Image (cartoon, helix red, strand yellow):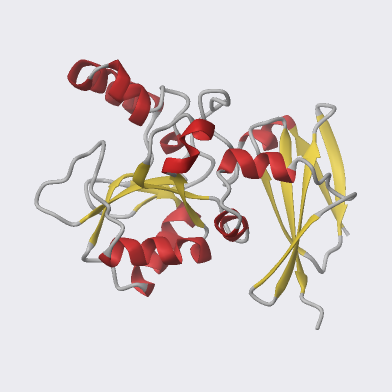
């Protein structure tokens, strides 16, 4: 059996962390950063690997350009302040997150554009057609979601951003896509399924996934997982962790 100690710091890192104005980051990126080319665009290593595989799958390496990945707090602050000066507060608060509240500071977010000679850094063109749409259609299979949908503006408090994608990992991306859930809504759903008591069950890719939320009532807790089970643990940034167990699909 695997004995895993969960601490409060574990709740603040991982590919499922919710980052917004109400849930600011406690630190910076959750993992190793990889340069994916372009103008020094960096992503968390797993995110970078899955992005490369997705682009290769749709043969989109030439048609799609990575515009912006990981940003430090200082970089986000500069972008926010520059936008305030150039575009005003209404535009900036609609499309640029406050420093400390940006998904780009995690390394799990990527802004993409249809390849062109000139690309708008803040609002790149990523149309619902051609290769960009092929990317959207396949994104969930590789762990990505389009983070800021038009119909979810009231939930995310961020304007519609067709270019902004977030890595959350499979099967979470597929569950969100199939059920039309924002990350905020998905967190609320999983929090209704306590770990070890009432798991959320999802079947996909010939696997059975059991997903549960473990809220930290104390500074640390210990859980035990069978050695023959593949598992993933990610913080939620809501004083809890999301535990995903990969089990063989029963015929």
Q: Between residues 56 and 229, which one lies in front from this camera angle?
A: 56
The correct choice, above or below, for 230 with respect to 20 in the image is below
Tell me where residue 119 sits by quadrant.
Answer: top left
The correct choice, above or below, for 20 with respect to 206 in the image is above
Residue 7, image x and y in percent?
Answer: 75, 34
Residue 102, image x and y in percent?
Answer: 44, 31
Q: Is residue 220 left or right of residue 58?
A: right
Residue 124, image x and y in percent?
Answer: 24, 44
> Quadrant where the N terminus lies?
bottom right
Q: Between residues 40 and 133, which one lies in front from this camera angle?
A: 133
Q: Is residue 181 visible?
A: yes
| Residue found farthest to the bottom | 251
Q: Is residue 46 left or right of residue 80?
A: right
Residue 55, image x and y in percent?
Answer: 35, 66
Q: For the point 32% across and 55% down, which residue is it?
A: 36
> Quadrant where the C terminus lies?
bottom right
The correct choice, above or below, for 54 with respect to 217 in the image is below
Q: For the point 38% across and 30% down, which residue is it?
A: 72
Q: For the point 83% across and 64% down, which residue is it?
A: 227
Q: Is residue 68 left or right of residue 30?
A: left
| Residue found farthest to the front | 151
Tell me where residue 183 sits by quadrant.
Answer: top right
Q: Is residue 226 left or right of residue 181?
A: right
Marks counted in the figure total 0
Q: Is residue 96 visible?
A: no
């Amino acid at each position: 059996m695997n004995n895993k100690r969960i601490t409060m710091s574990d709740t603040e890192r991982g590919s499922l962390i919710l980052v917004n104005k109400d849930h600011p980051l406690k630190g910076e990126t959750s993992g190793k950063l990889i340069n994916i080319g372009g103008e020094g665009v960096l992503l968390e290593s797993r995110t970078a690997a899955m992005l490369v595989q997705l682009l290769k799958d749709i043969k989109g390496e030439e048609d799609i350009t990575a515009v912006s990945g990981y940003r430090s707090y200082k970089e986000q602050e500069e972008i926010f302040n520059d936008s305030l000066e150039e575009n005003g507060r209404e535009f900036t608060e609609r499309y640029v997150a406050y420093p400390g509240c940006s998904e780009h500071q995690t390394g799990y977010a990527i802004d993409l554009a249809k390849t062109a000679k000139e690309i708008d850094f803040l609002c790149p063109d990523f149309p619902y057609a051609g290769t960009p749409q092929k990317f959207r259609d396949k994104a969930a299979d590789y762990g990505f979601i389009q983070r800021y949908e038009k119909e979810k503006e009231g939930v995310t408090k961020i304007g519609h951003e067709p270019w902004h994608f977030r890595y959350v990992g499979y099967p979470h991306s597929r569950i969100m896509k199939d059920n039309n859930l924002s990350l905020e809504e998905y967190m609320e759903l999983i929090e209704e399924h306590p770990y070890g008591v009432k798991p959320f069950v999802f079947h996909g890719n010939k696997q059975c996934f059991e997903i549960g939320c473990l809220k930290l009532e104390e500074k640390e807790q210990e859980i035990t997982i069978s050695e023959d089970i593949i598992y993933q643990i990610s913080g939620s940034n809501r004083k809890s962790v999301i535990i995903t167990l990969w089990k063989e699909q029963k015929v």
